[in-house]
């Protein structure tokens, strides 16, 4: 995979990967402002199987924020996330808190290059693929990378946290 170059590719997520020397491919697509299922929109627009396109969600586990990365074909299993991080109770983070912590807007939150570093859990299904797509940090821009590279970049845990 080639590294993205140029101003269209400059996001904190791509800068983080560049700093680590991790290869990735950028996939821009036209974002429809009326769409609210951002991950499914990306899968359709880019022509990738939706199980290879992952969404980034922030959740509150016992008062602490965690980043969860799950396929767009699933929902985040909050109990499984809490268990994966040794917590008791998890809930979706308030969107404003998620935006403040990550530095990104909802629908374009990337697991990479977040303003505040929070622990990340990647759904174990990601490891079934040669590459996966995640947000590059804005709506209409995804990046493709090898799952193990995402784990390395984020020091992420791998656990079955997506519920079909």
Image (cartoon, rainbow, N blue to C red):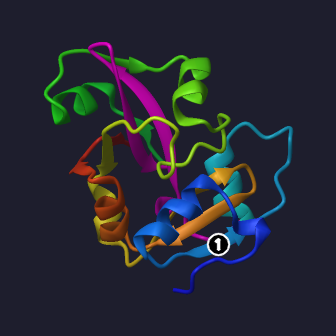
For residue 61, what is the image quadrant?
top left
Residue 110 is left or right of residue 47, and the answer is: left
| Residue name at image x 27 percent, y 32 percent | 81
Does the segment drawn in magenta span residue 56? yes
Residue 10 image offset from top left, x and y in percent: 69, 63
Above or below — where is 130 with respect to 40?
A: below
Residue closest to the far front: 19
26 or 3, nearer to the observer: 3
Magenta stretch in the rendered image: 46-72
Residue 118 seen by the camera? yes
57 or 15, nearer to the observer: 15
Quadrant containing the C terminus in the rendered view = top left
For residue 11, what is the image quadrant?
bottom right
Residue 95 is left or right of residue 46, and the answer is: left
Residue 134 seen by the camera? no
For residue 120, what is the image quadrant?
top left
| SS at mark 1 in the image | strand
Residue closest to the far bottom: 2
Does the segment drawn in magenta span residue 145? no
| Residue name at image x 26 percent, y 14 percent | 62
How many callouts does the rendering have? 1
Residue 109 is left or right of residue 64, and the answer is: right
Residue 4 is left or right of residue 33, and the answer is: left
76 or 114, nearer to the observer: 114
Above or below — where is 74 with respect to 90?
A: below
| Residue name at image x 86 percent, y 41 percent | 33
Say which residue label 1 marks. 26
Residue 149 image offset from top left, x and y in percent: 35, 69
Residue 88 image offset from top left, x and y in percent: 18, 16
> Are there few (<14), some (14-19), or many (20+) residues within 10 Å of tag 1?
many
Residue 84 image offset from top left, x and y in percent: 18, 36
């Amino acid at each position: 995979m080639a590294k993205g170059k140029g101003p269209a590719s400059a996001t904190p997520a791509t800068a983080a990967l560049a700093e680590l020397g991790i290869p990735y491919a950028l996939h821009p697509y036209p974002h429809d402002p009326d769409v609210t299922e951002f991950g499914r929109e990306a899968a359709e627009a880019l022509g990738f199987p939706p199980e290879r396109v992952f969404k980034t969600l922030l959740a509150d586990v016992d008062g602490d924020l965690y980043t969860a990365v799950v396929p767009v074909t699933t929902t985040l299993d909050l109990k499984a996330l809490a268990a994966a991080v040794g917590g008791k109770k998890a809930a979706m983070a308030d969107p404003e808190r998620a935006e403040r912590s990550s530095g990104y807007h909802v629908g374009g939150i990337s697991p990479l290059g977040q303003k505040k570093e929070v622990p990340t859990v990647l759904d174990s299904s990601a490891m079934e693929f040669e590459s996966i797509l995640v947000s590059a940090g804005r709506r209409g821009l995804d990046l493709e990378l090898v799952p193990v590279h995402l784990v390395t970049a984020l020091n992420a845990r791998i656990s079955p946290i997506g519920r079909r």
